[in-house]
Image: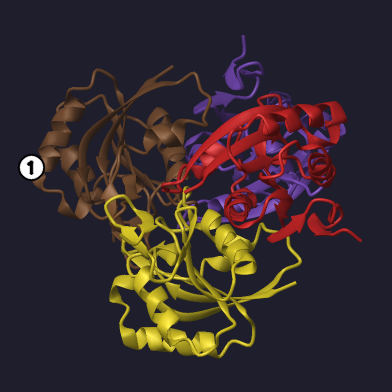
Chain colours: A brown, B purple, C red, D yellow
Amino acid sequence: MPHIHVLATGGTIDKVYSLSGELEIGTPAVETLLAPVLTDLTYDVTPVLALDSLDMTDADRVVLCQAVDALPGRHVVITHGTDTMPETAAFLDAHLAAADQTVVLTGAMRPSAMASSDAAFNLGAAFTAVQLLPAGVHIVMSGRVFSAGKVAKDRERGVFVDQP
Amino acid sequence: MPHIHVLATGGTIDKVYSLSGELEIGTPAVETLLAPVLTDLTYDVTPVLALDSLDMTDADRVVLCQAVDALPGRHVVITHGTDTMPETAAFLDAHLAAADQTVVLTGAMRPSAMASSDAAFNLGAAFTAVQLLPAGVHIVMSGRVFSAGKVAKDRERGVFVDQP
Amino acid sequence: MPHIHVLATGGTIDKVYSLSGELEIGTPAVETLLAPVLTDLTYDVTPVLALDSLDMTDADRVVLCQAVDALPGRHVVITHGTDTMPETAAFLDAHLAAADQTVVLTGAMRPSAMASSDAAFNLGAAFTAVQLLPAGVHIVMSGRVFSAGKVAKDRERGVFVDQP
Amino acid sequence: MPHIHVLATGGTIDKVYSLSGELEIGTPAVETLLAPVLTDLTYDVTPVLALDSLDMTDADRVVLCQAVDALPGRHVVITHGTDTMPETAAFLDAHLAAADQTVVLTGAMRPSAMASSDAAFNLGAAFTAVQLLPAGVHIVMSGRVFSAGKVAKDRERGVFVDQP
């Protein structure tokens, strides 16, 4: 049975509402989302960055890339903001050192702290995809599976689509 | 892009709390669970049965089998109670007419109407698995993917495991 | 500022879903319900009974009555199953030793663990009523305030009404 | 039995998360919050303003004041942002035409759309207070009841306190 490494980078999925009325990046939502899932899978969750993905630079992506490279296992799920998820996927695809890791990026259009959110659905999708997909970098969003470099976000509709 | 057929049969995922203080099978939870998932996927949801899976007979399974056979598409997700999900998967595997359908059974250990439930995670897992797996009958539960005939439910822990 | 004593007796408000698919009385829901309420109020929560209120006997009510009598403060909220809440209110009204306590019974028509429940609304109502009402035994349910002995539950509609 | 008029003015209680990642004032949350409360009470909900309360001007407060004056009934609940709720309460207290209305302002420190929010608790508190309090303008927040002019918000802790 695979061990799954989860790396958290912030983004909408991890946003919480502060006392001053602002949205902030909280602790990784993955632990809370996985709490009701009784499973023999093992996993660990590591916060690597805590950014709105619009603020993510290539220097941040180098940090993320190094974090993936340093993982001992082959199954990697990355939670990420949606706005630049395609850019980060392409960056990882170009720069990851190992050829045998399956890396799946996912996130959410609404914070997991909202009563109605796509976060749990997307995480279930990502955990399944990372077990079934071959090595490479993938995005799992909007109920679909995309390869790095072949995906874009339609910001007006909030839907991930094939790269036009 | 695949069209996904969802067949609902009842089970814990669809349980609601009645005014008289009993748990009852409500309308299929899938529609509510998919509401926050913005997607270009198309799908339809058909209630076929509305049973606690402990009450499901082989006559019920014949009805379900015929419902799957009658579907025009190849991608089928079935929501089902957990207690006899392995039995139903084995039955479908033995009796389905077509050889080219990918059928994924899923459900939940806690009703989707609970504030904390595995239902959304499991549905995201099932929707992904049905797109990635080859033809055949599969169970997606407990964060894992199982083939019909090779899976059991550990009732004490509420975890799906490899058939011992 | 008043200190509020909360006594939990079980009932629907505290029901949780077990792995075996049954509803059971869990730990008092009040702590979880109060978590998002930032307040200078002080309160304590004591589990006294853990019963479906249909199973509550007068011996149980004596235990509850003694627990109320033993409280040092005057502001008491009791969470209770709905089916016999009017009976317990009348019993307390007849048997409480002190004349200066304000006792408010409340509960919920749906478990607080459901995504949609009246539990938080009812608890806010009870905490307010216990501060505003004179000494005596009261029920706060269905958005209204009733005196012990003048209230009944319309079981078909799930609504508390004036005693006919 | 009293009829309760609810006037919505926006504020945190009504905030929703937009596709572009911003918090916006949505439709009044009161209807959704009251959905699980089975009751013989009657009420109506009118959106009067849709503002972050930091943006509320005295011109807006005149509009709100006129809306209260125009109500036929005596029981009025106003949902309002927390930051200037004390100012609006004082304004209404000084300017309302009728002497026989009980007006209760409430709101929430976290949006009612969050999985964990004080919104339902506060609304239950407000609905109870408006039935029990004498005529005048009141604030019900942080589990307590305050009179207009005698209340302040401690912004650092997110708690309403007695006016120092």
* Residue D68 visible from this viewpoint: yes
Taking the view exactly as shown, the residue that stands out farthest to the top is: B164
Q: Is residue D23 above or below residue A11?
A: below
Q: Position of residue B25 (x, y in %)?
A: 76, 44
Type of amino acid at the residue the image marks with label 1: Ala
Of the pair A111 and C82, the residue shown nearer to us? C82
Rendered residue at 10%/45% (across/down): A58
Of the pair C115 and D138, the residue shown nearer to us? D138
Q: In the rendered view of the protein, which quadrant contains the C terminus of chain C?
A: bottom right
Rendered residue at 72%/35% (across/down): B96
Q: Position of residue D91 (x, y in %)?
A: 38, 80
Q: Which residue is mark 1?
A: A59
Of the pair D137 and B131, the residue shown nearer to us? D137
Horizontal side, residue C161 vs residue C112: left or right: right
Q: Position of residue D51 (x, y in %)?
A: 36, 75
User: In which quarter of the view is residue A139 placed?
Assistant: top left
Q: Position of residue A117 (x, y in %)?
A: 46, 51
| Chain label for disc 1 | A
Q: Is residue C111 above or below residue A116?
A: above
Taking the view exactly as shown, the residue that stands out farthest to the right is: C164
Q: Is residue D118 above or below residue C70?
A: below
Of the pair A150 and C52, the residue shown nearer to us? C52
* Residue C27 visible from this viewpoint: no
User: In which quarter of the view is residue C50 placed?
Assistant: top right
Q: Secondary structure at mark 1?
A: helix
Q: Is residue C90 above or below residue B42?
A: above
Horizontal side, residue D103 vs residue D161: left or right: right
> How many numbered discs sit on the rendered protein?
1
Label 1: few (<14), some or many (≥20) within 10 Å?
Answer: few
Horizontal side, residue D65 vs residue B66: left or right: left
